[in-house]
Amino acid sequence: MAAFEIPEEQWAQVVEKSGGPAVYKKIPVQKPGPDEVLINVKYSGVCHTDLHAMMGDWPLDTKMPLVGGHEGAGVVVARGSLVQDIELGDHAGIKWLNGSCLACCFCMQADEPLCPHALLSGYTVDGSFQQYAIAKAAHVARLPKDCDLEEVAPVLCAGITVYKGLKESGARPGQYVAIVGAGGGLGSMAIQYAKAMGLHVIGIDGGDEKRESCQKLGAAAFVDFMSSKDLVQDVKDATPDGLGPHAVILLAVSEKPFQQATEYVRSRGTVICIGLPAHAFLKAPVFDTVIRMITIKGSYVGNRQDTQEALDFYQRGLVKVPFKTVGLSELQDVYSLMREGKIVGRYVVDTSR
Ligand SMILES: [Zn+2]
Ligand SMILES: [Zn+2]
């Protein structure tokens, strides 16, 4: 494969101070280090985390100035001298976990998201809201050549995250899983992954529009938290024996569902926390948790193997992502919609405009 022509400068969305805004401007293209690749990002999904990174409202500092973005899909155009298993011209994805040390006790056991030296795309290192982005070769997602780079972008964070949560829940084919926030962007992907994994889905969300979208995606039941008079009972009743779902996946961005889940999960069941409501706490009755042997766990993105598995479900056509594409130059408008809670599905930015 012949070398690519790489420009000196490129368009990017740069956050120059915590609190924003992101500024659309030209910046230099970086050169990859020995263990890194340079990816010509074609499309990048926009995640809620990107807004938090710009606002600086999480208890973890970002680099500054910062190029956000961690759902970048593109083409490898340069590689460092140590990189051998990726060719120029290969399709690759930039995900939240940009790199890790590969040597600590977590990396050794494929828990690399827990690595104390983890590099985070669009947070502690520059991410995919630019035309040329750098990532550690060991960690970039390997995308098949025939993969649609626009459509696959949201799988690189949203898809991996919900798939990993379902795996962590330990729910087996034929069992029931409740997905809280099932009508949102993450939720719509979680329903499809759960179905593809052979699970029955109980969607929990509010409003008729969300009900319709959950049913269309194949949820076996829907419980509307806005109109339900007894949510706990309704969720239990949605399972054939009335004992409740075997697992609960919490994607909600408010605190209350986190307090309720242990009440309707089946005895011996597992509650998986994924959504990150600000300043929220978990609360569960100790008595119930003990005598019903309930497990409560957090689940955070995924490792390299989870990434490839999540992509494989997509590649087989089992997961479709509802998305809308705008130019990279319009990123600030996407953030405004996000703040107003007006986003249905996922926004993808096209870095060529
Ligand atoms: Zn994300
Ligand atoms: Zn490590």
Image (cartoon, grey):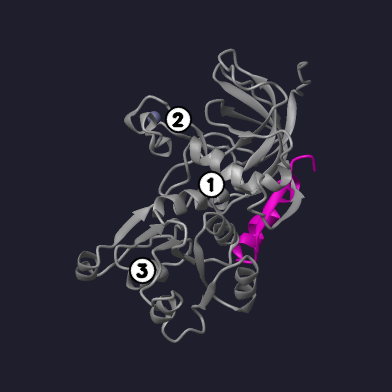
User: Which badge, 2 or 1, comes first in the chain's sequence?
Assistant: 2
Q: Is 230 left or right of 54, judged from the image as shown?
A: left
Q: Decide if ligand 2 comes within 8 Å of the CB at mark 2.
A: yes
Label placed on residue 100: 2
Residue type at tag 1: Ile
Residue density around tag 1, few if under 14, some if 14–19, many if 20 or more, within 10 Å: many
Residue type at tag 2: Ser
Question: Which range is magenta?
Answer: 328-353
Residue density around tag 2, few if under 14, some if 14–19, many if 20 or more, within 10 Å: many
On screen, residue 118 above or below 32:
below
Q: Nearer the viewer, residue 236 or 133?
A: 236
- Secondary structure of the residue carrying tag 2 is loop
Question: Where in the figure is residue 56, as x and y percent of width and height?
Answer: 49, 49
Q: Is 276 left or right of 139, judged from the image as shown?
A: left
The quadrant in which residue 85 appears is top right
Q: Is 14 left or right of 294, judged from the image as shown?
A: right
C-alpha separation, residue under disc 3 versus residue under disc 1: 24 Å
Q: Which residue corresponds to mark 3?
A: 265
Q: Which residue corresponds to mark 1?
A: 160
Please tell me in which quarter of the rendered image ligand 2 is found: top left
On screen, residue 135 above or below 25:
above
